[in-house]
Amino acid sequence: MIALKDFQRVRRLGRYLRKDRKSLLLILFFLLPVALAGAVQPLLVGQVISVLRGEPTFPFLNDMSTSSAIRFLVISLLVSVLLRLGCQGFQTFTIQSVGQRLTARIRSDLFSHSMALSLRFHDKMPVGKLLTRLTSDVDALSEVFGSGAVGVIADFVSLGVIAVTMMLIDWRLGGLLLMTQIPVTILILWLQRLYRKANYRVREELSQLNADFQENLQGLEVVQMFRRESYNSEKFDFTGRAYRDAVNGTIFYDSSISAFVEWVALAAVAFVLVLGGWMVTAQVMGIGTLTTFILYSQRLFEPLRQLAERFTQIQGGLTAVERIGELLEEPLEIVDCEPRTSRFKEFSRTRGAYQGEVVFDRVSFFYRKDEPIIKDLSFRIAPGEHVALVGPTGSGKTTLIRLLCRLYEPQKGRILLDGEDIRTFPISELRKKLGVVLQDTFLFSGNVANNLRLDTPISDARLKEICGELGLGSLLGRLPNGLNTELRERGGNLSSGERQLLAVARVAIRNPTVLVMDEATAFMDPSTEATLQRDLERLLEHRTALVIAHRLATVESADRILVLRNGELIEEGTHLELRSEGGLYAQLAELQERGLSSL
């Protein structure tokens, strides 16, 4: 049985069908003609036999000759067959079209919602599991709204029409045949509940299978380098066996339903033959009517077979509804404010251009409550000031950048940009003012020009000019087609240093107020870094800069250095001041000078 929560989820997802209301109404309109055309066929066949025996049931056939009556019945049978085939063909085409449009809308919303979810959600959700919900779960869901749900309605209409027709012809045989439907329906519903549980396990195992496959493909270099092929293959084989066992469970319940319905259908035919034969012998019923009931006993279970198959389909779809509903119901942690609120407008008018002051005011953040990453942290970066963040691994440096960009929300405290809480800024406006260069540079497949532009409208000529100013001329000269060179996935046909050069360039194009750099030159060779250093100095000019750096030369040039340990600010000052204090910074700097550590 379908639970109330399932109905609520289906109803909520039903909004995706509003644009196809006319098509759905047209599909429903054709249900009755299809059912009537199917129900009249056994009746026409029975009348043919009755006419041949000279016992026609319909009075108007008595006024016709045998040949004329047979001709009329055969033509009527042909028309009913063609009418049913034509209406069913139209229904099938329209239903599939609606299902495909539904799939596209839901998948689009799922993608948009997934992109809007915070990094906290994606940290715990494997990519392969998310892809399963965006692909196979959505496909299963489209069948519920399309062929599954509409097919169930069609089967119920067919059952109703056949039941009424049988009762009108002979209420005794008709009533007895309909009573056989009760135990069949009860057993089917019981098996469907078991199928639902088994199907949910199938979806979960498929998600894990995709997650394992995706993880191994992404880490293929490490797998081959450390000779993990055999171990990972065994692990993947274990996941594959779990998926196979789960599928076998659904096959068992599905085949059980089909076998049971088939057995009951054969028993019903035998029952009609025995009872109907006795009634014909007793001259209570004609042979033509008996033939009609034999055909009806077969037709009566055809919708039931279809219902069993469609309920299986629907149970699989409801599992998908549950999983997709869980994703769509996942709350957005990073909620955008109203675009251009009155307070934001007032701030824009009074301040004019943004100055780039950054303030962390008693900020605390944790992934888990028992493991705080940032603890009651407060500091101020003045407009135009260059500040370096240093500290051991795990001290919270990268987390600070993610908090500033609102990729995470702090549990306590606030972060201010020019005196305004960043949560009052529209996210698009906030991130336009922040230029971020990460250590791990991500490039999209496509050409170099599109990776530099991203969301910034800029002509090819101006883009080429900016690249020249940033010292990218030699890099573009090495590429086969310059800015039009196609990049492989994640920029696989470029070196790490070349990818970082492009990352710096696409930030410079946006002319941000606050520049955030997380080891932006970590993968560059000395000569490439020296070439870029002059352009970085020009890029940093008149801008606030927050730099995470491990190299002493980069740290020394900062106006101020903040030293973090376990999410707390323990030291603050210039390079010389911190060296003279002999604290953690001095220890790390000394170790680096000896070549034993990096800041």
Image (cartoon, rainbow, N blue to C red):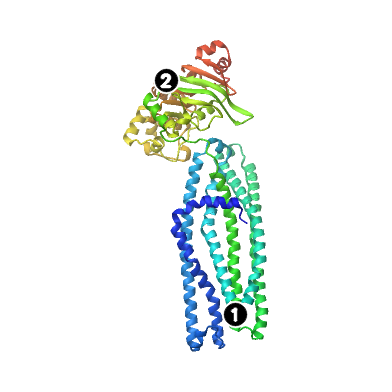
- How many numbered discs sit on the rendered protein? 2
Q: Is residue 512 left or right of residue 579?
A: left
Image quarter hosting the C terminus: top right
- Place of residue 41 in the rendered image (x, y in percent of width and height, measured from the top left): 53, 76
Q: Residue at x 63, y 73 (%)?
A: 175
Q: Residues within 10 Å of mark 1 (few under 14, many from 20)?
A: many
Residue sitting at 44 percent across and 26 percent down?
515
Identify which amino acid the numbered label 2 is placed on: Gly
Q: Is residue 220 left or right of residue 474?
A: right
- Identify whether 336 is placed above or below 550: below
Residue designated by label 2: 384
Direction from residue 162 to residue 484 in the image, left or right = left
Q: Which residue is mark 1?
A: 291
> What amino acid is labelled 1 in the image?
Thr
**Could you tell me which residue is drawn at 51 percent across and 29 percent down?**
403
Residue 485: which quarter of the image?
A: top left
In this view, the mark in front (2 or 1) = 1
Q: Residues within 10 Å of mark 2 (few under 14, many from 20)?
A: some
Image quarter (top left, top right, bottom left or bottom right) of the N terminus = bottom right
